[in-house]
Amino acid sequence: MSQEVSRNTNESLALRYGLSAVLLWSTVATAFKLALAQQSVSQLVFFASLTSVLALGAALLWQGRLTEAMRSLRENGWRALCFGLLNPLLYYHILFYAYDLLPAQVAQPINYTWALMLAFLAVPFLGHKLTRTDVIAMLVSYSGVVVISFGGDDSGQSLNLVGIALALVSTLVWAAYWILNSRDKRDPVIGLFQNFLFATPCAAVLAWPLNLAPAALGGAVYVGLFEMGVTFMLWLMAMKYTRHASRISNLIFISPFISLLLIHFILGEKIHMLTLVGLGFIVAGLAIQARSAKKGRASEPLLTE
């Protein structure tokens, strides 16, 4: 009986951690736009990265692992530098430029297609098989991107094609990062801390001279905590405590819809019908892919390495 109670307690903890992460991630599209209104892209990357380093370092200190993280820098320095240049430096510069050029309701749904790009890149780089179901999922989701791209902004102008291209490229960079990360033997939190530790000075050079206005710093700190740092640890804890990772992972499907509500009520963006239709296609494609993965990717292979 005690074992069953412990299991239920762990699943309850996993759900709380997972929901907390999803709710925080739902706020970041709005936070990006608010923060970018106060500062440049490069400054936001720097201050958010610095915040994330401090948050991750504090977490490691609390866990008694900060010394371990610092000592292993000599062994993992080049790896941390290369990973850090990819994420946060390159990825967040591209993503924030996309948000700077697009309405949040457009950039945010496109960003969710990174999971499909991950499946595609896993074919040549990890030797995974791309199934018919995967291809269907991609076609459905990217149809949603096309639908969203036909929408306009609140002034009735056509959407910025460079912004759309950047949003799509950001999914490529993010997927590539996780492909490489799958072969990284470091502890996830230690690895992320080391990556950000090396990337932050590079970000400072790009961001100079700095804007130290409180409004700018506040937005960057929020992004650093709840997009890059704390939320990542909450998600790791959810995965640690659950025996059903797929159930926790399904929580992510509610995030884009909560995000749209925040975009509407906080940013004041009028949510267009094409945005809702396109997001529906994107989420449907992701759900198809998730269902395929849950079944053990049993459908017939269509493309292989």
Image (cartoon, helix red, strand yellow):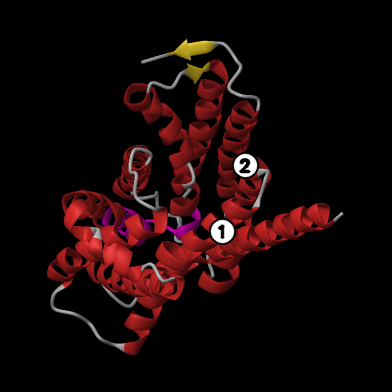
The residue labelled by disc 1 is 237
Q: CA distance from mark 2 to mark 1?
A: 29 Å
Residue 270 seen in render:
no
Q: Quadrant of residue 280?
A: top right
Residue drawn at x 39%, y 56% is: 102
Q: Is residue 104 magenta?
A: yes
Residue type at tag 2: Gly
Percent of width and height locating residue 155 = 44, 61
Percent of width and height locating residue 268 = 54, 70
Q: Is residue 84 magenta?
A: no
Residue drawn at x 43%, y 22% is: 128
Q: Tell me the SS state at disc 2.
A: helix
For the stretch drawn in magenta, the main secondary structure is helix
Q: Quadrant of residue 247?
A: top right
Residue neighbourhood size for the residue with mark 1, other residues' Cα within 10 Å, grouped as few (<14), some (14–19), many (≥20): some
Could you say which disc has been placed on residue 280 in the image? 2
- Which quadrant is the C terminus positioned in? top left
In the displayed structure, does residue 291 sit left or right of residue 176? right
* Highlighted range, magenta: 92-105
Percent of width and height locating residue 16 = 67, 63
Residue drawn at x 21%, y 59% is: 73
Percent of width and height locating residue 188 = 40, 53
Of marks 2 and 1, the one in the foreground: 1
- Which quadrant is the N terminus positioned in? bottom right
Residue type at tag 1: Met
Residue drawn at x 24%, y 55% is: 84
Residue 96 vs residue 192, the one in the foreground = 192
